[in-house]
Image (tube, rainbow, N blue to C red):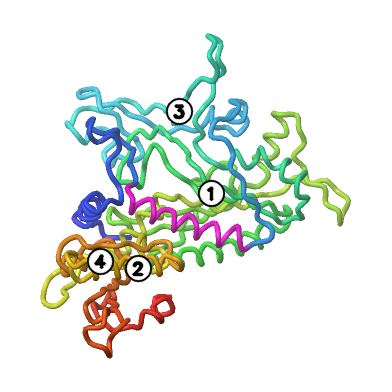
């Protein structure tokens, strides 16, 4: 079990705000619990993660189809899925201060952790956000979706009719989900507005165990692509699994607040397709051309939380060391995840010829790398430290030798490595290949 490190968590939160990764939601109005806004570097990091996920699990596979289902759905979807009746957490209220807590998150079930008052009896609290669709008084009830999976299940027949895939095949999407958490906590780990990367992988019922193991290997690959260590596979027992699951393995990461779920892998059986068939009256069976039989497929579901991946990557990257005798903080992102891949500097910002050459080289590098920046703010040492702190792997400096002050070094630049601080001269013509 991971050792809790609240000081490290505070450092992560502080750096994330200071450097434009993640800001508290609605901050100028005092905030809104469980909501966070992504700044320029945060959205770049998140996009790198989601793009990598899509490339790994959708684009590179011939049998996984992407969709983007609507957030608002017919309320009957959530009745059929069981969310209206059962998407609940146990809530307790303090009889003294009236604060509310999740009962299963409390060590002392009798005493309020805030004021020491007596806690009331647990009640089930449905976490779906209810809304209404339409302008009339009799407007239809709807909900902000609490998960993206149901949008996939209700489009199962559409994908079958459009593409005629053979089993096994998957449907994937990345999208927002909303959960009215009783007690959002731990920065972006447990929030009310979240983003999910989910796949529903449809298989023949008698092959689900084999396909489950294949996806287990796929998830391990994903964890390695994020550069994560200290990830543990936890087999969920009979009494703790969701009622529709015959097997669930949680992949848990050692966050600063303790070991907790990063992503989950479950076999949902045919629960969802059969429930939607029964509720809608539309058959969601699959016709097997080989056996000439109709079958309701089983579903393997690898479910990935974007925010939890972002937090794990930030925590894994956070590093402190000494460079040239001075302490520094830097984010040691894997190069393919870094929000900024290359920063280009003129040695001095008050020398137009250096600035012009630096902008020319930045434009040249942008042809190959989307995430390049020009930076002339502060002296060169401050720029290096700032780029270290946001995790930029390479800094390219244009100096007077680049312009030909030393003829032997004309059209060369200095490339600095984030992790070691080492610098070397590189020909501009070779720069793209070196940075690759």
Marks 3 and 4: CB-CB under 8 Å?
Answer: no
Marks 1 and 4: CB-CB under 8 Å?
Answer: no
State yes or no: residue 41 in magenta: yes
Mark 2: which secondary structure? helix
Q: Position of residue 347 (x, y in %)?
A: 20, 71
Residues packed near mark 3 inside 10 Å, few (<14), some (14 to 19) or many (20 plus): some
Mark 4 — residue?
355
State yes or no: residue 185 in magenta: no
Report the side of 6 relative to 43 (left or right): left
The tag earlier along the polypeptide, 2 or 1, is 1
The N terminus sits in image quarter: bottom left
Label of residue 129 in the image: 3
**Depth check, front residue: 97 or 264:** 264
Q: Position of residue 379 (x, y in %)?
A: 14, 66
Image point 11% across, 76% down: which residue?
A: 325
Report the side of 109 relative to 221 (left or right): left
The tag earlier along the polypeptide, 3 or 4, is 3
Mark 3: which secondary structure? strand
Q: Residue furthest right?
A: 292
The tag earlier along the polypeptide, 3 or 2, is 3
């Amino acid at each position: 079990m991971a050792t809790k490190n609240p000081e490290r968590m505070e450092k992560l939160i502080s750096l994330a705000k200071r450097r434009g990764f993640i800001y508290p939601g609605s901050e100028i109005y005092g905030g809104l619990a469980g909501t966070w806004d992504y700044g320029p570097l945060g959205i770049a990091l998140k996009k790198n993660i989601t793009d990598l996920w899509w490339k790994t699990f959708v684009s590179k596979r011939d049998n996984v189809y992407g969709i983007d289902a609507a957030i608002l759905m017919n309320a009957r979807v959530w009745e059929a899925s069981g969310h209206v009746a059962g998407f609940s957490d146990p809530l307790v209220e303090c009889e003294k201060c009236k604060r509310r807590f999740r009962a299963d998150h409390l060590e002392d079930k009798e005493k309020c952790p805030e004021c020491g008052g007596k806690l009331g009896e647990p009640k089930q609290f449905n976490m779906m956000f209810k809304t209404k669709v339409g302008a009339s008084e009799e407007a239809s009830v709807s909900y902000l979706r609490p998960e993206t999976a149901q949008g996939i299940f209700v489009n199962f027949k559409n994908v079958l009719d459009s593409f005629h895939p053979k089993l096994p095949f998957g449907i994937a999407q990345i999208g927002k989900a909303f959960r009215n958490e009783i007690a959002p906590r731990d920065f972006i780990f447990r929030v009310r507005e979240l983003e999910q990367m989910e796949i529903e992988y449809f298989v023949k019922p008698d092959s689900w165990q084999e396909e489950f193991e294949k996806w287990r290997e796929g998830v391990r690959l994903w964890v390695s692509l994020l550069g994560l260590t200290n990830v543990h596979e936890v087999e969920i027992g009979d009494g703790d699994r969701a009622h529709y699951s015959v097997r669930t393995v949680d992949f848990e990461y050692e966050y600063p607040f303790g070991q907790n779920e990063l992503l989950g892998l479950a076999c949902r059986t045919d629960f969802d397709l059969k429930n939607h068939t029964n509720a809608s009256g539309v058959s969601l069976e699959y016709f097997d051309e080989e056996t000439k039989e109709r079958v309701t497929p089983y579903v393997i579901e690898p479910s990935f939380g974007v925010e939890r991946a972002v937090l794990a990557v930030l925590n894994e990257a956070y590093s402190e060391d000494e460079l040239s005798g001075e302490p520094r903080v830097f984010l040691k992102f894997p190069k393919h995840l870094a929000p900024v891949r290359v920063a280009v500097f003129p040695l001095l910002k008050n020398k137009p010829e250096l600035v012009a050459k630096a902008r020319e080289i930045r434009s040249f590098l942008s042809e190959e790398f989307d995430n390049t920046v020009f930076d002339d703010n502060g002296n060169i040492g401050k720029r290096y430290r700032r780029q270290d702190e946001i995790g930029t792997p390479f800094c390219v400096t244009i100096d007077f030798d680049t312009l030909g002050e030393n003829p032997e070094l004309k059209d060369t630049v200095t490339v600095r490595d984030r992790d070691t601080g080492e610098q070397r001269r590189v020909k501009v013509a070779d720069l793209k290949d070196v940075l690759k």
